[in-house]
Image: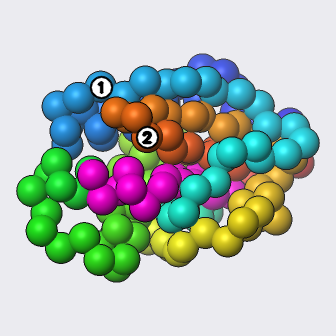
Amino acid sequence: MNGINEKDIYTFVDAVSNFFFHVTQEKVEIKTAYLLEDDVPSATFDLTSYITLSGGFTGRIYFSAPRSMLTHLLLSMGEQNRDIERLLDAAGEIANTISGNARKHFGETMEISVPTSQATEPDWLKTVVSPRSYVILVKWKHYRASVVVDIQRSGQK
């Protein structure tokens, strides 16, 4: 077991909901949040950013979204530059915000890295996520994105 529970997952749901509402003044719809046991069906998109955890926790928190969603998000923020670097920065900002909110919930022993962002290869996430991670599917406007929570308290298997 990865050491986090359903209640903990609401921290991530609230974080992604609050981010989109703060930035766009629009609510996101949480389509589902589930325990990932075998596969990552439709949980990865064009662009992915992740935060690596250390200290009292290990693992990663991922945000993955289609390029079109991040482009629309930047447009709604009034951002004129929408090249690939700015899109990756936006994905990283979302991952960082989600992780920062998680740190408030879990405490100071959760150390978070700077975000790592990349254009996602097909099936890339399947190769790095443990078999007992949580997936939160998000819908903003007509776009879908995902937050994958692959963390455990240090010292737990």
Q: Secondary structure at mark 2?
A: strand
Which segment is the magenta one? Answer: 57-72
Q: Nearer the viewer, residue 114 or 57?
A: 114
Q: Is residue 141 magenta?
A: no
Residue at left 30%, top 40%? 19
Distance Cα–Cα, label 1 vs label 2: 13 Å
- Mark drawn on residue 143: 2
Q: Position of residue 1 (x, y in %)?
A: 86, 36
Q: Is residue 58 depicted above or below 101 in this figure? A: below
Question: Which amino acid does the dot numbered 1 rest on?
Answer: Lys
Question: Which amino acid does the dot numbered 2 rest on?
Answer: Tyr
Location of residue 80 (image quadrant):
bottom left
Give the colour scheme of this rendering.
rainbow
Q: Position of residue 18 (x, y in %)?
A: 31, 32
| Residue identified by numbered label 1 | 27
Q: Position of residue 67 (x, y in %)?
A: 43, 61
Q: Nearer the viewer, residue 124 or 156?
A: 124
